Image: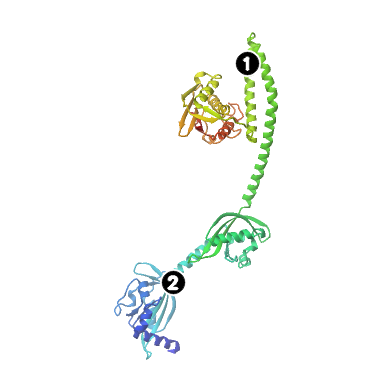
Amino acid sequence: MGIENQRFTNLRVDFLTNAAMQSILMEMPLAMYACDVNGIIKFYNAEAATLWQMHPTIGEDTWRAVWKLYRQDFQALLSEEFPIFRTLKLQVRHSREELLAERADGSIRHLIIYSYPIFDENNLFNGAYELIYDVTDQKKARTHHQIISSVIESAEDAVILKDLQGLVIGWNNGAIKLLGYISPEIIGQHISQIIPTDRQKEDEQIMELIKRGERIRHYETILKHKSGRWIPISLTISPIRDENGKIIGVSKIAREITQEVAVRKMLELYNKKLKQENQYKDQFLSLASHELKTPLTSAKAYIQLILHNANKHRKYYTFATKALLSLGKLENLINGLLDVSRIKIGKMTYTMAEINVRDFVENTVEDVRQFTEVSRIQITQLDDSRVMGDKLKLEQVLINLLNNAIKYSPDGEVVQVAVKKIQNKVVISVSDHGIGIPPQSINLLFDRYYRVNHTADNFPGLGLGLFIAAEILKKHDGTYWVESTLGEGSTFYFSLPLS
């Protein structure tokens, strides 16, 4: 039978008759069983029983009882095609047959089976045994690896893998497209080949973070193309771990952001230019306001003199009164521009003192009533709380809210004023039943020069009143907000801390 078969013969005879040898085989981490010339099982170890999910009866059950076998295409094997059957029939070994086995619970395992004949000391055929390797887990891992490799290879983004020494070990089609190097040119090369010299230290610092198991997202840098040009990219960097969780490398997913960087630079230039233009505009408004203030004061004084001496001439009295009202509006506009200029350069001054809220609201409402119907403004609720503030500046806030409420309630609807103490604050509200404000405009109301589109043509103004009011309230540690329903009206609130 030859030297090799003789070696197997002696070993197998010893194994079938030696209890010590059977004890060793029983603990072997490899499935193994043996049967006689009739296929009746004479021995199997613990690993075989676990793999079969059953314990055949020694001396009674045959190899046919343990499972069903299939080819890789899931075509079932006939009994005469089983490796053990062919070995029993032909008395020769059958090496490395890769098959699928269906176990008792219906699960499928991937197996590599070796089948050997057994001869006694007289070279008489005594049976056969099989060694069975369960490679299911390796198959799954290989399939998982293939899936991951396929995903990486087909990804649009560049995927670059490197080991802990910085050598490139993976380079997908996305990386070829982004950086120009084909895999043979870059695999095995150091990653520093594509990193700017002045950013090598950054890469080393990132490596230290990765070695600690951290992950970095949306890190913006530049990488060198094969042609020598630098490409702006956004990186997501993650550790690569082995099956035991040990970090063995680094994964870099790179996405080109050339367009995003260009747009960002354009926006930065635009904002810089806009800021500069706003500075010029603020300088102009400040200068113009001051220059207009002087002749306005003179004109107002002369008209007051005319008005004082025009009592006997009704027509001139009327003209002078209207001129004075117009000058008053112009003065308010100029004061608004001056306030904006002072706010911008931080020169708005405040004289703080304790204020009785009841007196403050009643007096301010009374001042506004002089220029409208008395019944149009109603105080629905008052409180005797006290706050610290600049009385004139806070009057400016409330007057602005009252004038807006009257202006945007053109049908003579009542404007309501209420004061409530809520915890350590006092809240003052002004409500109207006018045209209301679109939801998309509410958050913009307190911006400088903002005018609600559907009101700009019908209601004149510069859009400064609420901006100035908001700045005044901020200096008082106050808050402000709006509730409004289009077509039904609005309520403006502001709160001040109690003194």
As drawn, 36 above or below 186: below
Give the mark nearer the N terminus: 1 vs 2: 2
Q: What residue is shown with label 1? A: 321
Distance between mark 1 and mark 2 Cα atoms: 103 Å
As drawn, 203 above or below 426: below
Front-most of residues 108 and 88: 108
Amino acid carrying label 1: it is Thr
Amino acid carrying label 2: it is Val
Which residue lies at the image location 36% right of the left edge and 80% below the top edge? 23
Question: Is residue 490 shown to the viewer in this render?
Answer: no
Residue 282's disc is: none
State the SS at label 1. Answer: helix
Query: In the rendered image, which quarter is residue 319 located in?
Result: top right
State the SS at label 2. Answer: loop
* Quadrant position of the N terminus in the picture: bottom left
- Residue 21 x, y percent position in the rendering: 37, 83
Q: Say whether residue 52 is left or right of residue 95.
A: left
Looking at this view, name the residue that lies furthest to the top.
312
Front-most of residues 136 and 359: 359
As drawn, 326 above or below 48: above
Which residue lies at the image location 39% right of the left edge and 68% below the top edge? 108
Front-most of residues 344 and 475: 475
Q: Say how the picture is coloured.
A: rainbow
Q: What residue is shown with label 2? A: 135
Which residue lies at the image location 65% right of the left edge and 14% below the top edge? 307
Q: Nearer the viewer, mark 1 or mark 2?
A: 1
